[in-house]
Image: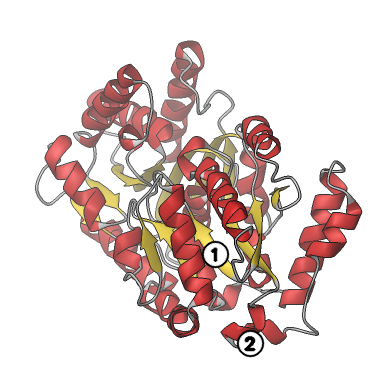
Amino acid sequence: MKTKILYTITQGHWGGAQKYVADLALSLSGQPDYEITVACGEQSEGLFAVLKNSTVKTIQLHHLVRAINPLKDVMALHEISTILKNGQFDIVHANSSKAGFLTALAHTWLKATQKKSYNARLIYTAHGWVFMEPMNPIKKIMYHMMERIASACRAMTIVLSEKEKTIAERTLNIRAGTISVIPNGIDCARIHFFDQQTAREHTLKKIALNRPEYPLSQLRRVSYVAQGDTHASSTHSEINNECVWIGTIANLYKTKGIEVLIRTADVLSEQNKNNVHFTPFFFVIGEGPERARLQELIQKLNLADSFFLVGTINNAAQYLKAFDLFVLPSLKEGFPYTILEASCVGVPIIASDVGAIPEILQDKNNGFVVPHGNSAQLADAITHTLNNSELYTKLKTSAPAIADKFSLEKMMEKTKDVYRDCR
């Protein structure tokens, strides 16, 4: 008999949690022992598009939204309860804070009222604890209470790093034996990476198409590319005194630290006046509610000719070879897929010291780890990496080992072990 699994998630706008759900759903749906359903709230088209040509069943949760909305939240709770009651699932695997909380309430209610017919086991993956984000203290307390209540309802809580496990044990009083650390995993072979020239050309076309305020003459100046994909194997000296592409893939939320990256660009711009040996251009692939504020800051600091908010690009990881450096300046993270994706192509990685990042990167060994929120230290790390040929080469050649360590196959096997243990 097949194991029936339901995944719930708050929104489908593409990000780490959505990739996680898609990877699990697609991997298991291809195996004869599983029947997979995914239920998603707002912006479900992003996640559902990835699942479209598979055997995964999808359900739209019409009232589940990311923001707290008492009326919609009650209606979403009813939606989820109905799906759980009628679906006869063996495993219900919730993802993201809002879906996690409402799914826990629905699950607990059905266990109490439908004892003979409802036998599902509830699992939750925390993609970074939301109460650790910078936010209003009242909201922080509320989210903490939600997580604490929900954690008592679950058979198992999956966290992505040892750090997240420690936070859970200290602040949520999760029962011993009901928390498991399973890092995200990646299969590099599943991603078709463009060569450097193609990736840069497509990126610039995207900017010109969607952001006409950027003058084409400036874009042409930025479009320096050596013949073919030579930089993929170039020596450090070949990027000195040339325009260096520094990039990230991140939705424009406060927690992603894009403001820090903008201020880092400002620091480097000032340093460039004093003969820094490279000319940096910054590219952020992603979209979100912070765009207007970030664009205003870019204009205020006179960085419009060197800092580009590219917008959304489908399958953004395909463009990673465009970058000479991948920088993730997040203020809060769980276990970022983007670092794993960047490691697949061997681009040197600089990232902040949040979430699982210090467990992924060993500082100055396979990556460069900097204090979060500190634009001056991030600028120093960028300068040091680009001006130090030995370090640049070391980071470049050691990066692929990260993807080998955190493989999708390992993630899947550990997750299936949790499912079997919970049955």
Percent position (x, y) of residue 244?
66, 68
Viewport quadrant of the C terminus: bottom left
Vertical position of residue 272 compared to residue 169: above or below: below
Dot in front, 2 or 1: 2
Which is nearer the eye, 365 or 133?
365
Return the residue found at the far left. Answer: 176
Name the residue tied to disc 2: 234
Element under disc 2? loop
Percent position (x, y) of residue 250?
56, 50
Q: Residue shown at 41%/27% (left/top)?
A: 81
Residue type at mark 2: give it. Answer: Ser
Vertical position of residue 105 compared to residue 2: above or below: above
Spatial CA distance of label 2 from label 1 is 16 Å
Q: Is residue 310 visible?
A: yes
Determine which of the numbered discs, if any, sits on residue 76 in the image.
none
Vertical position of residue 41 compared to residue 265: above or below: above
Element under disc 1? strand
Can you tell which quarter of the image residue 279 is in? bottom right
Which is nearer the eye, 12 or 379?
379
Vertical position of residue 258 compared to residue 152: above or below: below
- Contact between marks 2 and 1 (CB within 8 A): the answer is no
Residue type at mark 1: give it. Answer: Phe
Name the residue tied to disc 1: 326
Percent position (x, y) of residue 206?
81, 54
Q: Is residue 23 visible?
A: no
